[in-house]
Every structure is written in structure tokens, then in C-alpha cells.
Amino acid sequence: MTAGAIPFVARAGDSETDAWVQALQQAMPGERVVRFDALSAEERATCTVAVVANPEPADLRQLPALQWVHSVWAGVERLVAELGDTPLKIVRLVDPQLADTMAEAVLAWTLYLHRDMPRYARQQAEAIWQSQPYVPARQRTVGLLGLGALGEAAARRLLTANFQVRGWSRKHKAIEGVTCFAGDDELQPMLTACDILVCLLPLTPQTTGLLNTERLAWLPRGAQLINFARGRIVDDEALRAALVSGQIAHAVLDVFATEPLPPSEWQWKHPGVTVLPHCSGPTDLGTAAAIVAGNVGNWRQTGELPPAINLGRGY
């Protein structure tokens, strides 16, 4: 297979773009990896694969020979929305390091809620010296929405901390030590026992607004929420109302419908919300570049594309 330059196409600043180009070039010394804007007209006409990070569709249209793109993000809903009507194959990043990093974050912020950290922070602000009753982890049930690579890694990490773990997915999964549920009919039974609910689902038409007023009410009163998935999976106004009523005691939100979260949004100052700047699962440049390099190298040698996303499912 004739090799052409591999452009990195992204909506990103110069420093981030250059860091990705450097990492990818180091991982693929036999390739020429360049910024999209550094390609000559002749090179643009011959590129067959591109590495992307939420690229401008107009940029990709300047690569007429392009066959497939390899995203350096695990989330691909924006790519699907913008490129789904093209014949391009879209490959998302599946990185065990990302799963491990996310599992670490799930455990950390679950413990934050489990050990009443938000309440102690409020007590400190009011100079209140008072301990809260301790609940052993084995008496606390953590539910995971999403049991893919991220969800399974998170489940295993939670089990090591002695939490009761249950999980829900589109299709049935079997994970030792985890009570698994699947499909629309089993969502309510899953939610009714969750003291802490962690969302790790991909954003699709089916999951948009999934956690609405009705489904938040299925949780035990005073349950707590962690959203490390996508902001639009949670109905913001439904969550706000649930926080006011006490149905939800606290929410840790790392993702929002609009990012960065505008300073005027209610979540910033709500006492029942912890706002994080989309930091729960950062991509590791080194491991991600190695995975991209392996996939590109195999394609160069065999002509076989890595597994592409299912445009119908959206992931």
C-alpha cells in the first residue's frame, strides 16, 4: 500500500496540535505526520488516513482520497454528527490506560461522596465541628450506567474498595461480583437500589436526556450522582429540581452541555454540585499515539481497517 503523509486534523491550539504531532511522529517513525495546515496541495490529494481530534469537516473535505480517520478521543458523538453522512470510516480510541485513569477517577469521587466530603466542606465554611455517621462501603451500592471498557474497569476498582456494585448496559454483560442489568425494562430495577450513580454512557440519540425527572425519581431519595460521560445525558433542569427537593443530595459533574461551562450557569454556585473541568479521563499522549501507530501500521501491512464505530448506534 502506497504511503502518504498522515495529517493531524483538529480544533485545537497550536501547542496541543504540535504536542500530538510530535507524539504521533515518535510512535510512527516510518511515517510523515504533519499538521493539516502544513500539507502541500499535492499531499492533500493523496492522504488516505488522518488522525483527528474533533476536526473541522471543511478541512477533511480537502482530502479527497481519505478512506478513514482515527480519533484520539474515546468519545465520537461530534464526529458522528458531523461526518456520519460521509463514507469515511471512523475509528475511536480504545486505550486501556484511559480506562484505568477513568476507573481511578470513579473511585476517587465515589469516595468523596461516600465519606461526606461535600457536607464537611459546608461545615468548614460555617465553622461547624461535627462528625457525621460512618457507613461502611459494603453497605453502600454504587451503580454504573455503561459497562463498556470504562465501566468494567470502574466496576473492578469499586469492588476492591468493598462497595456493592451494579451496572446497566444496552446488552447483557457478565462481570464477576457485579449485579448486571440491561435494556429499557431493567433500568428502573437497577436504579432503585443505587446510593451513588455513576454515568459512563456514550452520548447517542437514545441516551440524550436519559436521566430526566422520571428516572432520577427512581433512585432512592438522597442518592448522589457522578456524571463522567456527556452533559446532555442528564436533563439539567430535572437535576436542578431534584437537588432542590432533596431527591438528589449531591452531584459531581465533569461534563456539561456547553463547555467550558459559562460563568452564568447555575451549577457553579449550587451547594449541591461539585463542578469539574472535564478532567476525569484525560488522554495519555504516549499510550494513545502507540495505539494509533499500531492500527495504522497494521492497515499499511494488511489493508485491514481497525474496527470502526457503528454509525447506527453512534459509538
Image (spheres, rainbow, N blue to C red):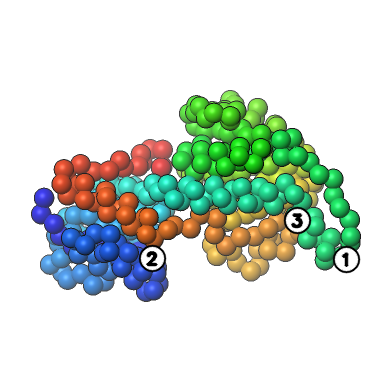
Q: CA distance from mark 1 to mark 3?
A: 14 Å
Return the x and y of residue 291 as percentages of the image width and height.
Answer: 32, 51
Q: Calculate the distance from the C-alpha at mark 3 to the C-alpha at mark 2.
A: 35 Å
Q: Is residue 140 or residue 266 the one in the foreground?
A: 140
Q: Amino acid at mark 3?
A: Pro
Which three-letter amino acid code belongs to the residue tagged 1? Ala
Residue 137: x and y in percent read 71, 39
Numbered tag placed on residue 118 in the rendering: 3
Residue at coordinates 27% horizontally, 64% vertically from top-left?
26
Q: SS for tag 2?
A: loop
251 versus 44 height, above or below = above
Foreground mark, 2 or 1, reads 1
Q: Is residue 242 above or below residue 139?
A: below
The structure residue drawn at horizontal position 31% and vertical position 68%, both measured from the top left corner, is: 22
Circle 1 residue: 127
Q: Quick one: 105 or 180, which is closer to the camera? A: 105
